[in-house]
Amino acid sequence: MGNFVGYQCSVCGKSLRADYKGYTCDSCGGNLNVILDYDHIKKTVKPEDIFASPEKSLWRYLPLLPVQDPGFEGTALHSAGYTPVYKSDKLAKNNGIENLWIKDEGRNPTASFKDRASSILIARAKEISAEIICTASTGNAGAALAGMAAASQWKAVIFAPKTAPQAKIAQLLIFGAQVILVDGNYDSAFDLSVEACEKYGWYCRNTGYNAFTAEGKKTAAFEIWEQIISKRNSEKPLNIFVSVGDGNIISGIHKGFKDLYELGWLPVMPRIFGVQSEKSAAIFNAWAAHTEKITPVSATTIADSISVDLPRDGVRAVRAATQTNGAYIAIPDESIYEGISELGRIGVFAEPAGATAFAGMKKAIAMGIIGEKDDVLVMNTGSGLKDIRSAMIAAGEAPVIAPTMDALEEFLSK
Amino acid sequence: MGNFVGYQCSVCGKSLRADYKGYTCDSCGGNLNVILDYDHIKKTVKPEDIFASPEKSLWRYLPLLPVQDPGFEGTALHSAGYTPVYKSDKLAKNNGIENLWIKDEGRNPTASFKDRASSILIARAKEISAEIICTASTGNAGAALAGMAAASQWKAVIFAPKTAPQAKIAQLLIFGAQVILVDGNYDSAFDLSVEACEKYGWYCRNTGYNAFTAEGKKTAAFEIWEQIISKRNSEKPLNIFVSVGDGNIISGIHKGFKDLYELGWLPVMPRIFGVQSEKSAAIFNAWAAHTEKITPVSATTIADSISVDLPRDGVRAVRAATQTNGAYIAIPDESIYEGISELGRIGVFAEPAGATAFAGMKKAIAMGIIGEKDDVLVMNTGSGLKDIRSAMIAAGEAPVIAPTMDALEEFLSK
């Protein structure tokens, strides 16, 4: 079980043993944090050992994970994570700051951040001998589970509302998952998936419910630490912008940095900034009201992977900002399209959620929250190829000419 | 200029100096092969040096390239290539062979093989001080040029027929390329792009015209050599299956292996198998007729990136098979959909062209060309996210149920 020693409830603080069979706290229902044996890790591993690993995936951080290496070398499962970070002097200059990095999660096997969670979940399923993993999802999380399950020849069952885009359903089916569409909304798919897992003994991967999803997502923090922070000559915190839907990605990234800090491997905690669309701002609202109580909204943002009525990991998501001296930013949907265009200009084709984080950075600079000397990293959570419709709105139209040199010259002389 | 010493015409054999300004042979119009200083490379570089490179992109093969490193570290341009190779025991067993690898080019920055060519072309443009690169394309090559140009802040002009899919045009525009749609077909866009390059002094990247595209594409051969061949304990040739449209990818891969063989770094040449759809089989037809003369067809295959009437690199493409004891295979379009499904089952979401190569392998096994003991590598040339419509046909429909346990139980008991 790696260095996994137990859980602690994120709401009431109750400790639970590593062999606890539930998903959430048995006292208050709160989400559980996974606790590692930090003393043992400190004694047996050094950062240099990790940096020298020949493994080119998130499995290079195995000593900091609550699972053992599941095997499946030479498959897509062993190829998730360790995504590139680009440095853009152009975007930095255009936005009035000195250093700006973009971490491109679209380079993951199924083209989104969610492969991190799903590959760790497969490892966990193997350890607890769960033959079938189930989730409710219509988007990136479902594709990631289906893809990682296909890579490892695991069985996946995915519940989705029948109104989900046909293209996204196609991706789930291509990966060979058992896809069951329900005649209802996402919440009914979620509820049915939880019931089905209880009845049939399936392992439930649902985000903001299973404690191990954040343990996969935290590996992005380890990469930011290895790729940027460990090479920076600065005592100032790095400022990380990440889009927020159900709150599990920002919570996972926060957890990763907390692990590193606990180990004494992080001189200064980064500041974490959550960005939501104004049209899906339940966590922003709570943060702005100085509360951890999340009030549901009716989400309508075009950034589908962060369009969430009731965030399932809201409490920890608020804390990711409040505990790191970060903040929440809410942006209008229009600036998502602008963000897609601006990121495209440096060769990064972002999904709307990725552009949301970038738009949030721009607003934070305009608000004076981020200054000229503050180093910034923006997380692009997935590939723009997953949402061509938004790209088409952002891109606009191209000119049409007759196929002659005369027509070309006339056009170019305009 | 790296180890680049000149050109040799692939048709008439004429040698041309490295400072030759044309694109094709000035005697016969044939495509040019780039010649390297193999003696110098042999004296100064060893395979182990390359394998030990910390560079995680195609730039790790710099000593074997005809260009210098263009810089742009920390951008998508320095992140092209070095894609993963998956080994699938399941697909090997299902198809009656012992060892099968899939190289997944969908993991490139713009999600296709073509990033290899475009990143080398940017380096070449920098060396010859060409400020603007131009190409005719509607698909992967255009996206790759636009993406790599955005990463390096180079200027790109792309001509496409106005009938090109809106989604593909959107990707070009997102990357900030100057996109000019012409009221005509691809051939008229090609001809106009060549004329425009001559008139305005733009650098023409057109595939099967510019000698350096194959030099980028050959890096896939170097990776197969490093990732598979150098680690294999076998004196039998590896059998490589690659889909063929205009013929430049297969020619580029062949060139890479010829480079390695010339250097004495390759004990045995791999066998190269070209796969075409029966509905776009101009090169297959020539190979089957034992000629290098390519007769145009009216291509109608659903695999758009290999749908080509007149292949622009046909002669070298035929030789890639004939000179390596390989073959050409033509497959029906129906088996492309089956290939998409079968690859999906191991977590690889392939574009139709990638599934074409896989379908060709299956046919070669059925024909007895490939036997049980023959090791096979299939090249997936791009991500299935680029052609969701084909994926939807391949995937079929998912069942719909009411959101209740009763309905689920009834469905599962069927």
Image: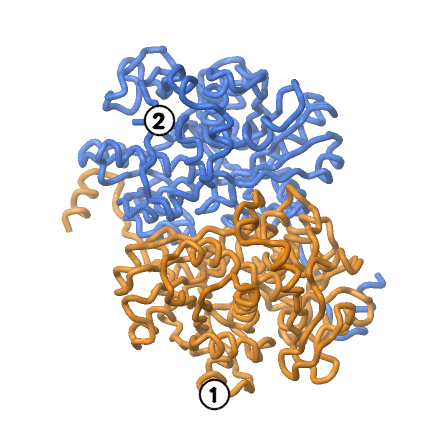
Chain colours: A blue, B orange
Label 1: few (<14), some (14–19) or many (≥20) C-alpha neighbours in 10 Å: few
Farthest residue, direction front: B43
Q: Which amino acid does label 2 sit on?
A: Pro
Q: Which residue is drawn at 57% across and 17% down?
A: A267
Q: Count every numbered label the image shows and give the total.
A: 2
Question: In the rendering, at what x and y percent does residue A44 appear?
Answer: 40, 21
x then y, percent, for residue B24: 70, 76
Q: Which chain carries label 2?
A: A
Return the x and y of residue A318 as percentages of the image width and height. Answer: 50, 19
Instruction: Residue A393: tell me if it is visible.
Output: yes
Which mark is drawn over residue A66?
A: 2
Residue tagged by mark 1?
B290
Q: Pick the residue in front: B259 or A210.
A: B259
| Residue B85 position in % (x across, y down) | 43, 53
A376 vs A149, left or right, is right
Image quadrant in which you'd find residue B391: bottom left
Q: Regarding mark 2 in the picture, which secondary structure is present there?
A: loop
Whether labels 2 and 1 share one chain = no
Please identify the quarter of the rendering in which residue A25 is found.
top left
In the image, what residue occupies the spot 44% across and 75% down?
B277
Q: Circle 2: is it few (<14), some (14-19), or many (20+) Cα within 10 Å? A: many
Give the residue displayed 50% in from the left and 80% down from the top. B283
Q: In the rendered structure, the residue with mark 1 lies on which chain? A: B
A350 in relation to B202, above or below: above
Mark 1, secondary structure of its residue: loop
The CA span between labels 2 and 1 is 60 Å
- Whether residue A318 sits left or right of residue B365 in the image: it is right
